[in-house]
């Protein structure tokens, strides 16, 4: 993850910096976000009645979902690790810094964790699980593909972790590297990424893909 390896990157402020909110870039300029990755609840519309769609993290603790939640092992999945951190933030005032909720959520899994993130959205889409916790972008690939799935944004709040781009320390061609980051952060590429690849932009002047939740800011942008 960008922050964890920041010593291997050369600090650089892109020419598009004014259009990128602070939460989507490094406070030390070692990396810049390319797209934002909100965490969402994904559900199979054929298996979950509209009235039963979980709309909060708390809803995932409903007894009817015991053993029915697709969730990847956070020791092998970066997105699942981020989801745990998101839950801790959501319930940080529970008297145990969010761990009461996380422990209850783990019990809900009933010992069933998946070995990789892709198994979550595939499992929900294929009907192996009625619900799962995953990335917005991954779930929308199935929605665009007309799979019988939908998503909800937890009412307590969620995180939008940026995937980052950076210049490697000691790059042979610093000038071209800087120009490339400027290009990737530019309005044209960011609009193309939302239009062609369903990626949520980090820019404050580019709308998310058509039909997406239009909240540009999420309650937390966790930079790990």
Image (cartoon, grey):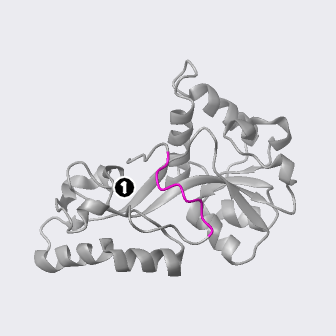
Left or right: where 8 falls relative to 68: left
Q: Quadrant of residue 180?
A: bottom left
Residue at the (16%, 59%) spot, across then down: 11
Residue at the (44%, 53%) spot, across then down: 161
Residue at the (43%, 47%) spot, across then down: 221
Above/below status of 51 relative to 142: above
Residue 214 sits inside the magenta stretch: yes
Residue 127 sits inside the magenta stretch: no
Above/below status of 67 relative to 10: above
Q: Residue furthest top?
A: 95
Q: Nearer the viewer, residue 190 or 58?
A: 190
Q: Position of residue 151 (x, y in %)?
A: 69, 58
Q: Quadrant of the N terminus?
A: bottom left
Q: Quadrant of residue 66?
A: top right
Left or right: where 176 falls relative to 121: left
Label 1: few (<14), some (14–19) or many (≥20) C-alpha neighbours in 10 Å: few
Main secondary structure along the magenta-highlighted residues: loop
Left or right: where 89 falls relative to 24: right
Q: Nearer the viewer, residue 179 or 212?
A: 212
Residue at the (75%, 46%) spot, across then down: 54
Q: Position of residue 121 (x, y in %)?
A: 68, 63
Mark yes or no: residue 77 visible: no
Element at badge 1? loop
Number of dots carrying numbers: 1
Left or right: where 196 falls relative to 202: right
Q: Position of residue 114 (x, y in %)?
A: 66, 55
Q: Position of residue 155 (x, y in %)?
A: 64, 41
User: Which range is magenta?
Assistant: 211-218
Mark yes or no: residue 215 visible: yes
Q: Which residue is mark 1?
A: 1
């Amino acid at each position: 993850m960008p922050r964890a390896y920041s010593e291997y990157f050369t600090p650089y402020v892109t020419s598009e910096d004014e259009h990128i909110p602070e939460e989507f870039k490094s406070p030390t300029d070692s990396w810049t976000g390319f797209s934002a990755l909100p965490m969402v609840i994904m559900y199979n519309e054929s298996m979950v009645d509209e009235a039963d769609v979980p709309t909060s993290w708390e809803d995932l603790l409903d007894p009817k979902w015991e053993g029915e939640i697709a969730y990847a092992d956070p020791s092998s999945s970066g997105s699942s690790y981020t989801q745990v951190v998101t839950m801790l933030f959501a319930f940080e005032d529970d008297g145990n810094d969010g761990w009461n909720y996380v422990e209850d959520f783990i019990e809900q899994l009933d010992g069933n964790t998946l070995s990789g993130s892709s198994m979550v959205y595939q499992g929900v889409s294929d009907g192996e699980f009625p619900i799962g916790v995953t990335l917005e972008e991954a779930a929308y690939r199935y929605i665009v593909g007309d799979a019988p799935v939908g998503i909800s944004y937890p009412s307590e709040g969620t995180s939008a972790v940026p995937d980052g781009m950076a210049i490697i320390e000691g790059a042979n061609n610093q000038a071209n590297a800087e120009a490339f980051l400027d290009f990737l952060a530019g309005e044209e590429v960011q609009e193309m990424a939302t239009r062609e690849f369903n990626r949520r932009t980090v820019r404050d002047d580019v709308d998310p893909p058509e039909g997406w939740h239009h909240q540009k800011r999420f309650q937390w942008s966790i930079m790990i």
